Image (cartoon, rainbow, N blue to C red):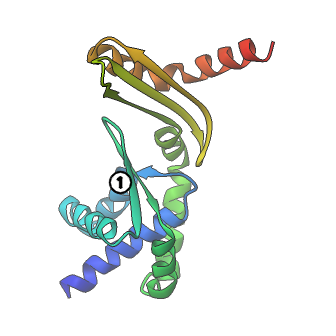
Amino acid sequence: MANETITFYKLIILYTLSKVKSPIPSGIISDYIISRGYTNYFTIQNAFGELLQTDMIEEDSTYHMTYYMITDIGKESLELFGAPLSYKMRDEIDEYLKSKRYDIANESSFISDYHRTEVGSYLATCTLREGTHVLFHVELDVATEEDAVKVCENWKESCEAVYQTAIRQLLK
């Protein structure tokens, strides 16, 4: 029964990821499952781990967040084995995603990360996405890790202004 239960949670994760156009953090999916009392955080993380191991989902990690997306293998598996997800549950997930659409857009549109370079500086990478389409991408080489963190943390609030300024200057 325990194996059937984790399979059910995996199907919820796959279905949820199949309904969004961009990679999303696990928290969006975990919140749905846990808030309805289906299971706990650790079981959900186990389900994510098993889906990653079987290449049904992919992850993309930044310095502070991990994003997930469904793979073609995951889509095929959902089509073949998704029957245990009732239409009622699918509708419930769809409604949940609809209610969270702004949170999802906010979490998946403004991506930032950094890493140390070979010369000892830090490269901060900031991306503005619409779904999976990259609208704007900038990389800044900064002297310290503290500066890289500042760039990444300020990206969400500043990206629209930076993007608009870049467009205006470059399209003169």
Quadrant in the picture for the C terminus: top right
In the foreground, 42 or 120: 120
**Place of residue 39 in the rendered image (x, y in percent of width and height, measured from the top left):** 24, 68
Above or below, 103 relative to 7: above
Where, by quadrant of the figure, is residue 44 drawn?
A: bottom left
**Place of residue 94 in the rendered image (x, y in percent of width and height, measured from the top left):** 54, 65
Where, by quadrant of the figure, is residue 51 drawn?
A: bottom left
Q: Residue at x 66, y 14 (%)?
A: 165
Q: Which residue is mark 1?
A: 26
Above or below, 154 relative to 98: above
Above or below, 98 relative to 149: below
Q: Is residue 141 left or right of residue 168?
A: left
In the foreground, 70 or 45: 70
Q: Residue at x 33, y 64 (%)?
A: 33
Amino acid at circle 1: Ser
Callout 1: 10 Å neighbours few (<14), some, many (20+)?
some
Q: Is residue 114 left or right of residue 1?
A: right
Above or below, 98 relative to 10: above
